[in-house]
Image (cartoon, rainbow, N blue to C red):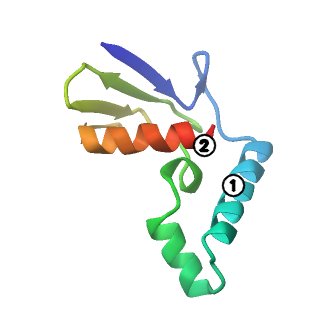
């Protein structure tokens, strides 16, 4: 079993810094330019369909998130934030997420 903590530094939940946010904006703009985005409509479509999760979303902040991998085709994510939820994700979602994480580093 693999346990991964998201949105933490050690055991303390942390929000994105202004430098982190700036880096995400730079990545999003570079990808939009490379994709030929030249209108508000194309920008909206790009954000909704082409921009990866690691750039278009955030995690962390005032609470952490725990991911549990058991070696099966699903993984479990427990968000310890306001909603305190656990969500099972099918393997294809996990694979997309891992690919997005690799491409953003």
Residue 21 locus on image (x, y percent) = 72, 50
What residue occupies the far top of the structure in this picture?
Answer: 1
Q: Does dot 1 land on a helix, a strand or a loop? A: helix
* Residue visible at 24% across and 20% down in the picture: 71
Q: Earlier in the sequence, mark 1 or mark 2?
A: 1
Residue 86 bears which disc, if any? none
Left/right placement of residue 39 relative to residue 5 reads right
* Tag 2 secondary structure: helix
Quarter of the image for the N terminus: give it: top left
Residue 82 in view, yes or no: no
Does residue 84 lie above or below 46 as drawn?
A: above
Front residue (pair 57, 79): 57
For disc 2, the marked residue is: 104
Q: Residue 11 sits in which quadrant?
A: top right
Residue occupying the far left of the picture = 72
- The relative height of residue 51 versus residue 71 in the rendered view (above or below) is below
Residue pictured at 38% horizontal, 27% vertical? 67
Q: Which residue is mark 1?
A: 27
Number of marks drawn: 2
Q: Is residue 77 visible?
A: yes
Label 2 crowd (10 A; few <14 / some 14-19 / many >=20): few
40 relative position to 69: left or right: right
Q: Which residue is more in the foreground, 90 or 87?
A: 90
Say which of 48 and 103 sits in front.
Answer: 103
Quadrant of the image containing the C terminus: top right
Asked if the residue under mark 2 is in contact with the one under mark 1, i.e. CB atoms within 8 Å, the reply is: yes
Taking depth in this image into account, of 34 and 89 the one nearest to the observer is: 34
Q: Is residue 32 above or below residue 10?
A: below
């Amino acid at each position: 079993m693999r346990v991964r903590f998201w949105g933490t530094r050690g055991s303390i939940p942390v929000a994105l810094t202004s430098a982190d946010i700036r880096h995400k904006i730079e990545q999003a703009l570079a990808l939009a330019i490379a994709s030929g985005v030249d209108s508000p409509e194309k920008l909206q479509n790009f954000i909704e369909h082409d921009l990866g999760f690691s750039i278009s979303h955030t995690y962390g902040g005032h609470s952490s998130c725990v991911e549990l991998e058991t070696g099966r085709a699903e993984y479990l994510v427990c968000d310890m934030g306001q909603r305190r939820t656990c969500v099972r994700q099918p393997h294809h979602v996990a694979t997309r997420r891992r690919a997005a994480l690799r491409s953003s580093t």
